[in-house]
Amino acid sequence: MKNDIQATTEGVELTDGFHLLMEALEMNGITNIYGLLGIPVTEIGRMWQARGNKFFSFRNEQNAGYAASVAGYLTKKPGICVTVSAPGFLNGLTALANATTNCFPMILISGSSEREVVDLQQGDYEEMDQLNIARPHCKASFRINRTEDIGVAVVRAIRTALSGRPGGVYLDIPARLFSTTMSAEEGKKSLFVPVDPAPAQIPGPDAVARAVALIKGAKKPLILLGKGAAYAQCDADIKALIEETGIPFTPMSMAKGLVSDIHPQCAAAARSMVLQESDVVVLIGARLNWLLAHGKGKTWGGAKKFVQIDIQANEMDSNVPIAAPLVGDVESCVNALRAGLKGMTKPTEWMDAIAERASGSKAKLGTKLATATPIMNYFNSLGAIRDVLKNHQDVTLVNEGANALDNARMIIDQYQPRKRVDTGTWGVMGVGMGSAVAAAVETGKPVVAVCGDSAFGFSGMEIETITRYNLPVTVIIMNNGGIYRGDEANPAHQVSCMTFNPNTRYDLLMQSVGGEGVRVNTPEELTKALEASLKSGKPTLIEAIIDPAAGVESGRIGNLNIVSTIGKK
Ligand code: OXT
Ligand code: ADP
Ligand code: MG
């Protein structure tokens, strides 16, 4: 029941910090909280649920935080994570930092010890200077010291998380504040909803004209879509820009499906060719960071000019000179370009050459996917998954691992925007189960999480969370017995530092928490199991046995792996 307050003293109706916080969140359209409860925040969960909202209770705050960040990415509203003090806060902080790195809006709310004890380091229960520890890892770190400031603080957190480049915000609430009371009437007046928390940022006309001229003069233009473009939720405008100009596009991993992977202008299957041969590249919500080889070197071939659309002005020139910076929000910039490029001559010859290369790559890959092997490898297993998911295009694919990640990104097509969530900018393992929970909750549609066996281990206990909330999540573990490979022997006859116990039964783990657990050895069994789980909608774990020798060190980023130059001892 809403507004279920409140004690009265001497005829004045009272409210308290707990109620004001919940009312402020509700008023701002928040219905789902992800978290892990205990002193001093336990009551938030109980009361939040009693008020008819949803609290998703995790087994480790890091996973709850990843869930909140993915909720933020998918909905364009900040995802909320609630944790206890010091250790709980620190677990959640990893996810907050990851959200900020990925430009996902998220608010981490943690209970904390009283300032007077923390500041004098007098050894409180779970004492920690959380406010300052959070500060370098997010866009802003705020503490609320007075109940009458709760409304302002929540709005300030929401505006900070959403405006400009989205990211994480930390909200520190000392324990005593939760139960501090004030007049209910005054409290109510202190709550509000921000006007236009993520304002459009229109690019300047000169900047648009510069970009238009550059693109019109290109012989081999390319559009590169990043997850900032997917986040912007102006899918039809981006598709129109691509189709009206005839420019080929290639997506970064989480932008796959923003325009369908099977669209005739999709150049993903000719990626190295288009990065090298293009002369003008239009980056839309994608940074020239390590994932794009910093915009230089042999990945990028010869001379190149960049047009970059980004809401963060100082992203321009971060790695290489940007010839035409378009600082603004994706929707405004894309529509300004569309207007300027109307009637532009389509680069047909360039597109034809790309299509030819792409069809050759697809044919080669098709052969690999169809080749049977005594034990499954990444190709025939992921090929089976791809074929099933073709018929379930609204499934969100969550993906983590190294070989399990890189091969799935290459093999599994995406058809709709924001249907792929993966390890993101940091390449972080452990995002799997939190992301799966959030995607199922926020989209209301099924989720398939394809995880390496190492990656799964980081958040594996959350399969209990998945079964507890009876979410339509299918976890597929690509079990090759280790990090990258499962066949590495230790030279000193110790337990290898790269492999796992080969007798582990992930399928039985799932059964033990009440889900369906299946072990499969062939692509046919995998197809059957995945079809059955999608049909049933029940929490399912499919353990796919993969050849321990099938993977390669570090997947497709082996070039970043540092090895000793003087050999092993
Ligand atoms: O054009 P070319 O010839 O180049 O070919 C490209 C495309 O054209 C082509 N392609 C296609 N061909 C045919 N048909 C179609 N449809 C098609 N589409 C594409 O395919 C190729 C490749 O295309 P892609 O993928 O687009 O391009 P490319 O060149 O690969 O892109 C470059 C990148 C950099 C953008 C891309 O590679 C990328 O996004 N990479 C991300 C990599 C990443 O983030 N990896 C994760 C980190 S690895 C490591 O750090 C791990 N750890 C350490 C650790 C971490 N990370 N975190 C924490 C908290 N602790 C520790 C650990 C522990 S991985 C790991 C666990 C690994 O073990 P697991 O058991 O989990 O996993 P397994 O490896 O499976 O055992
Ligand atoms: P990817 O990993 O897919 O290449 P990145 O995370 O590197 O993508 O880049 C996303 C970029 O998108 C960031 O630089 C961020 O500032 C930008 N961005 C996010 N939302 C918007 C938006 N609505 N308008 C413009 N730029 C945005
Ligand atoms: Mg593995």
Image (cartoon, rainbow, N blue to C red):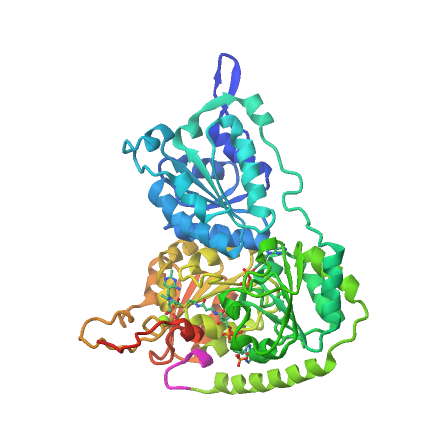
User: Is any part of residue 335 visible from this angle?
Assistant: no
Task: Answer left or right for 419 relative to 435.
Answer: right
Give the percent coordinates (x, y) of residue 439: 52, 57
Task: Answer left or right for 188 relative to 351.
Answer: left
Relative depth, front residue between 38 and 167: 167
User: Is any part of residue 534 visible from this angle?
Assistant: yes
485 over 469 or under it: above or below: below
Question: In which image quadrant can residue 484 be found?
Answer: bottom left
556 over 339 or under it: above or below: below
Q: Per the image, is 506 magenta?
A: no
27 over 521 or under it: above or below: above
Task: Answer left or right for 451 relative to 295.
Answer: left
Question: In which image quadrant can residue 491 be found?
Answer: bottom left
Q: Residue at x 60, y 49 (%)?
A: 164
Badge count = 0
Q: Residue at x 56, y 38 (%)?
A: 156
Relative depth, front residue between 157 and 453: 157
Give the percent coordinates (x, y) of residue 54: 50, 44
From the image, give the main secondary structure of the stretch colored magenta.
loop
Q: Residue at x 59, y 36 (%)?
A: 27
Give the percent coordinates (x, y) of residue 434: 44, 55
Q: Which residues are magenta?
A: 373-380
Question: In which image quadrant can residue 227 be found?
Answer: bottom right
Give the percent coordinates (x, y) of residue 547: 35, 80
Furthest residue toward left? 493
Q: Quadrant of the C terminus?
A: bottom left
Furthest residue toward right? 343
